[in-house]
């Protein structure tokens, strides 16, 4: 062997020995860095089992290192709720309470719609237990396998509203609610029933409140909201609804008129106003409700109701006079200007201030608190109504469309007499030979926006 070959062989031997030594030293170091784990792996021994190659072992180790952090990543799960199903017509459930409890067991990961679907599939016998759950009487499972409180409540409410109103109304009326707070929940559920069953159910439940409770806002307000909902869903006539006042306690009647006055339904303020004079203690509540800006008094109160408000300006009670003036302001009726001008000489300062505010809003001008200034303007207005108005209405009915439109524009410029023009505008719509005048008279009736003008506009539509 030459010297050159001997040198190369010796170098290879030394290099391989160094690599082996480094590898042996690195194995304990890497094992020490890994925490000890106990893994239970099932032993699989196929008949043709063969030992894994080093490459296969390295590949499997790489796969485990990649899967481990993914398994530990707690990402939110997006659940797609199924469609709602109709309640079952019949049921074979023997114990509805246990059946509903069973639905809520093992509900972890389910949403309210899924739980509600499971509940309604049990049939109508479950309705009383749904109500008990809404009232917080149910003994439901807790822990990791049960639905959370908010999902459970949402599911109970969702399932509850899917049943027919008559069935829910029967459950509400049969439910014994000795506690005031429970009755507050019941009365609001009754308001949500809808249809003709809602109003009588609300009233029957509300009769269970003590009179002192109904005088408190936290009880009266839910009752008023329920009555407002019941009115909006009812198709009963005003005559039928008016009978609801009979045999009611003053406290419940007060809640009734306030709820109806704020319902947004035009029948509500009209019914409340027609109740004036029935019970003296109730009149102030009615006037106060009609005076609220949210009350649609302008479009709701007819001549009979407005006449009752004007009479209330002469009440011996100054608070009633003040509320009557505020209600007339809310109604915006120009035919009440004369009565409000007289109230400027009232002995009560608040009544005078409210009457002046009402005059300013209705007449569109502010002549101060001096009744003499207002009386001078009232004389001029009265002369215009008696002399100029008939002539302008006659010119507006002429065949010359241009002259008719000029006269009509001059009529409508008197905003302080808009309610006195309603009858003439309705006649003009039917008598004018000019289509443009007819259309403008029809739109003017809608713009005036009183109960009378809106009714005549609907009649004009035929």
Image: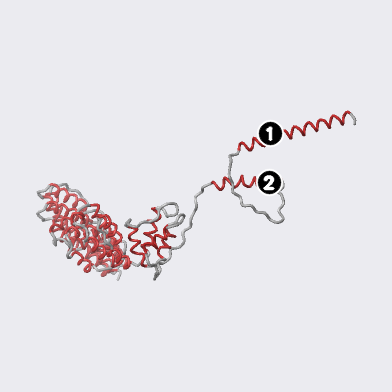
Q: x, y (%) of residue 411?
A: 23, 59
Query: Could you say which disc has been placed on residue 25 in the image?
Result: 1
Q: Are marks 2 and 1 in contact (CB under 8 Å)?
A: no
Disc 1 is placed on an element classified as: helix
Q: Relative to 322, is 145 on the left or the right?
A: right
Q: Is residue 403 visible?
A: no
Q: Is residue 319 visible?
A: yes
Q: x, y (%) of residue 316?
A: 9, 54
Residues at marks 2 and 1, CA–CA distance in whole angstroms: 21 Å
Q: Relative to 391, is 159 on the left or the right?
A: right
Query: Could you say which disc has been placed on residue 393 in the image?
Result: none
Q: Earlier in the sequence, mark 2 or mark 1?
A: 1
Residue 446, picture quadrant:
bottom left
Q: Report the colour scheme.
A: secondary structure
Residue 100, picture quadrant:
bottom left
Front residue of 291 and 21: 21
Residue at image mark 2? 57
Q: x, y (%) of residue 398?
A: 25, 67
Q: Relative to 103, is 376 on the left or the right?
A: left
Front residue of 445 and 16: 16
Residue 428, picture quadrant:
bottom left
Q: Relative to 98, is 241 on the left or the right?
A: left
For the N terminus, the image quarter is top right
Front residue of 235 and 440: 235
């Amino acid at each position: 062997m030459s010297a050159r070959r001997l040198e190369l062989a010796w170098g290879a031997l030394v290099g391989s020995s160094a690599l082996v030594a480094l590898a042996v030293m690195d194995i304990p170091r890497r094992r020490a860095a890994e925490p000890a784990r106990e893994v239970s792996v099932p032993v699989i021994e196929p008949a043709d089992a063969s030992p894994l190659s080093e490459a296969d072992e390295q590949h499997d180790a790489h796969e485990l290192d990649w899967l481990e952090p993914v398994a530990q990543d707690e990402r939110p799960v997006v659940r797609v709720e199924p469609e709602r199903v109709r309640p079952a017509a019949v049921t074979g459930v023997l114990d509805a309470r246990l059946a509903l409890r069973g639905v809520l067991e093992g509900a972890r990961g389910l949403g309210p719609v899924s739980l509600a679907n499971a509940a309604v599939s049990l049939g109508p016998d479950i309705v009383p237990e749904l109500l008990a759950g809404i009232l917080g009487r149910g003994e439901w499972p807790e822990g990791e396998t049960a639905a959370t409180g908010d999902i459970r409540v949402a599911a109970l409410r969702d399932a509850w509203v899917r049943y027919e109103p008559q069935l829910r109304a029967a459950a509400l009326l049969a439910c014994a609610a000795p506690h005031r707070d429970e009755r507050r929940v019941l009365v609001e559920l009754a308001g949500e029933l809808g249809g003709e069953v809602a109003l009588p159910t609300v009233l029957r439940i509300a009769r269970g409140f003590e009179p002192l409770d109904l005088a408190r806002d936290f009880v009266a307000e839910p009752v008023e909201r329920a009555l407002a909902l019941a009115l909006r869903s009812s198709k009963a006539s005003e005559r039928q609804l008016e009978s609801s006042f009979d045999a009611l306690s003053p406290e419940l009647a007060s809640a009734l008129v306030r709820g109806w006055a704020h319902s947004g339904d035009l029948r509500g303020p009209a019914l409340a106003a027609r109740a004036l004079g029935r019970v003296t203690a109730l009149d102030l509540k009615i006037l106060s409700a009609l005076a609220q800006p949210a009350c649609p008094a302008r479009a709701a109160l007819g001549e009979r109701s407005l006449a009752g408000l004007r009479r209330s300006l002469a009440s011996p009670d100054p608070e009633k006079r003040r509320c009557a003036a505020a209600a007339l302001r809310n109604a915006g009726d120009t035919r009440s200007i004369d009565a409000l001008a007289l109230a400027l000489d009232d002995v009560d300062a608040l009544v005078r201030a409210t009457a002046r505010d009402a005059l300013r809003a209705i007449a569109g001008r502010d002549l101060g608190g001096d009744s003499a200034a207002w009386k001078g303007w009232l004389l001029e207005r009265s002369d215009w109504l008696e002399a100029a108005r008939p002539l302008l209405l006659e010119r507006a009915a002429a065949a010359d469309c241009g002259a008719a439109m000029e006269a009509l524009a001059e009529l409508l410029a008197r905003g302080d007499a808009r309610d006195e023009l309603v009858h003439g505008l309705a006649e003009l719509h039917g008598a004018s030979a000019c289509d443009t005048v007819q259309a403008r008279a029809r739109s003017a009736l809608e713009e005036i926006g009183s109960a009378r003008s809106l009714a005549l506009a609907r009649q004009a539509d035929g």
